[in-house]
Every structure is written in C-alpha cells, then in structure tokens.
Image (cartoon, rainbow, N blue to C red):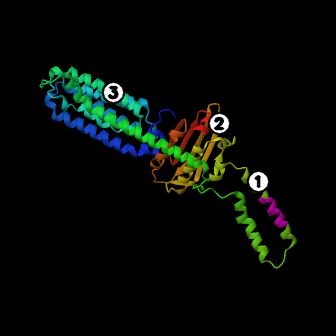
Amino acid sequence: MKNPTAQQLDPLGGITARPLVVVAVLIAVAVAAIMSVVTSEQVSRPALEAAALVAITASGLYYIRATSPFRASFSMRSHAVVCLLALAAVFLNAFAQWGGNAVIRDDWGPVAMAIMTVTLGSYRPAREILICTLVTGGVIAVLGAMQAETFRSDVPALVYALLPATPVFAAGAAAATFSRSLVGSLLAWRASAGSGAASAPDAPGDAAPPKSSHLVHLDDQVIPFLAGVSAAASLTEADGTRARVLARELRMLMVMDAERSWLERIVRRVSDPDRLAEGMGESERGFLRAVVAHVRHSDVFDDDTLRVSLVGSERGRQLVIEVDSRPGRNARVQLAPYIAVAHSLFAGVDWQIAGATLSIVLAAETPARLEDA
C-alpha cells in the first residue's frame, strides 16, 4: 500500500476520530457565524458574507459525510473538496469586507479552515496534508497582502500576509505531524504483529461454529446405542447389524465433514459451488470470522438466518453476507465498524437494509486481491 493513511491501516481508528471531526466542524461554523455578527459593521457586501457562511457550512457537512465509515476511506478527492470549499469561504469572507475591513486578524475564514484542518491527520497522509496546507496558506497570504492598503494599521504588507495564513500553516503542520507519527506507529505495530503471528499457533475460533454432522450423529445415534448395549445383559444379532450400519454412516459423515471448506465449518448456510472460499487470504478469512462471531453473539441479529454466498466471474469474486435483524434493533449502528474494515480489505463494498434483512456485498477485482490484500 503506497502512502497509507492512518484510517486505511486502522479503520476503527477512523471511526473513533470522527466525533472530533463533528466537533471541529461545529466549532468552525459557530466561529464563522459569531464573527460575522461581531464584525458586521465591516461587511460591505452582505450577500457575499452569507455565501461565505454557506461555503464553510458546506465544507464541514461534506467533511462529516465523507468520513462516515460507510464511505471509507476518506480520499484525496474528498480532501480536495473540503479544502476548496473552505478556501472559497475565505475568499468570500474577504471580498464581503473588502474596503471596509479594518483589522485582518478578525477575519473568520482562515480560523475556521484551520480548525477543520487540524483533524485531517487521522484521514490523509502527511505529505498530502503539507502540500494542501502550503497551497491554501500561500493563497491566503497573497489575499491578505492584496488587502494591505485597505487596513488602518501602517505595517508592511508581509505582516498582513502572514497574519491570516499563520493559523492554517500551524494547523496543517500539526495535522501532518500527527499523521506521520500515527502511520509510523501503526506500520511498526503491524510488522511486529505479523512476525509474531507467523510462528504463533492458530487461536481457537470465536465464531462458535455449528457442530459437525458426524458429531451430531455421535450424540443422537451412536452414543445412545452404545449406552443401551452396555446396559443390556447380552448382545443380539440385531445389535450387531445396527452397529455395522452406524459405523458405516459415521464413516461417510466424517468423510463429508473432512471435505467441507473452512467457511462451511463456521456458517450453517453457505453457497459456494466453486469452492472459492479456499482461495481467500487470511485477512478476508479473519474479517468473515469476526462478522460471524459478532452476529452469533449479538442480540441485534438472528443467527439462524445468517447466510453466505461466494460467486466468481471474469471480473473477480463476490462475497455476499445476509442476515436478518431482530425487531426494534438498529442494525446500521452494529454494521459500521465492519464496513469500515471491509473498505480496507476489498475492492468494492456495498450494503443495504431491506426490511429486516441486512446485506453486505464484498467484491475483489481479481483472485489475487483476495490472496494479497
């Protein structure tokens, strides 16, 4: 993975960071609204000031939407949209006060942009954050210098350039530093965890797989028969015939169980005619085991309705997980962490809730993707 983000390396971390994004957006919009009222006497073009407030609000709402676990991961395109909308708010705020702006330090545009920028470290790589910060901060500095003649204080234009750009530069540097540090820590942890896992024995499954058919046969038929024989005074010819029948059935069931895939051992209802489950990599297997374990232990879902199907095509493989939720339960909230993780493992992720049925569709572009992701 080239230039990974913290969200890609730790999808659940992206979920825990999202409340900070919401708080930052609320603070940024509140600062913009309050400062617009406080400096209203400097606003010469109210329509542009209103447009600036709309732009910063749109930037914040898009940021919140794009960081949703259902739309992970937060892309470079989303980063660009957030920055451009915020920069548009800076321009509109400046032009709304052009000629009447007495002190540039009370312009809310750069401050609001900086408040949102500081939370980007969890979602984008350090290099990208720095580049965006240098570009947007540079544009803001030029804009500040252009307004130098309209301000009351008689100071060099460089001061007017640095004053509005400083919050953006500082927030961008902090976000980039945080991103670099967090990604480095996650990569180091993955390396150490991977080396330890290579020699560690397989941990017992947490998915509580259904009992194998030959074990069911033992419980229902063989053990009761043996208990009856041991309690009887003597063996009969019928007992011998029954013993041979049970032995033959048990051998057949053991052979059938041995031929079952790992997926059929943890899920009761599986459709995998081409045995594509055997080609899945360890990450995908771990993901599916986690989903099955969650469904089995959660009171939100009906475990008996869980069904998994694997379908192959020329474009790759598709894994479909379906399960019914219990009445009055919020399956969407339960789904969020797994959708976030799935985005880092599969090429395509889709989900929907139709009535009580939750469906997750996971796709790999090529068979190699499932092996190497």
Does 303 lie within the magenta span?
A: no
Q: Circle 1 is placed at which residue position?
A: 255
Amino acid identity at mark 1? Val
Identify the residue under disc 3: 134
Closer mark to the observer between disc 3 and disc 1: 3
Disc 2 residue crowd, few under 14, some 14–19, many 20+, Cα 10 Å: some
Give the mark nearest the N terminus, 3 or 2. Answer: 3
Nearer to us in this view, 157 or 319 = 157
- Tell me the quarter of the picture where residue 313 sits: top right
Q: Earlier in the sequence, mark 3 or mark 1?
A: 3
Residue 277 drawn at (x, y percent): 65, 43
Q: Position of residue 237 (x, y in %)?
A: 87, 71
Name the quadrant containing residue 171: top left
Could you say whether the residue bearing mark 1 is in a helix, strand or loop? helix
- The residue that appears at 12% across and 23% down in the rendered structure is 154
Which of pointers 2 and 1 lies earlier in the amino acid sequence? 1
Q: Secondary structure at mark 3?
A: helix
Q: Give the label on residue 321, or none.
A: none
Q: Amino acid at mark 3?
A: Leu
Q: Nearer the viewer, mark 2 or mark 1?
A: 1
The stretch of residues the image draws in magenta is 241-250
Viewed as shown, does residue 133 lie left or right of 148?
A: right
Which amino acid, by three-letter code, is at mark 2? Gly
For mark 2, give the secondary structure: strand
Q: In this rendered view, identify the residue nearer to me: 322 or 170.
A: 170
Q: Position of residue 134 (x, y in %)?
A: 33, 27
Q: Residue at x 22, y 36 (%)?
A: 33
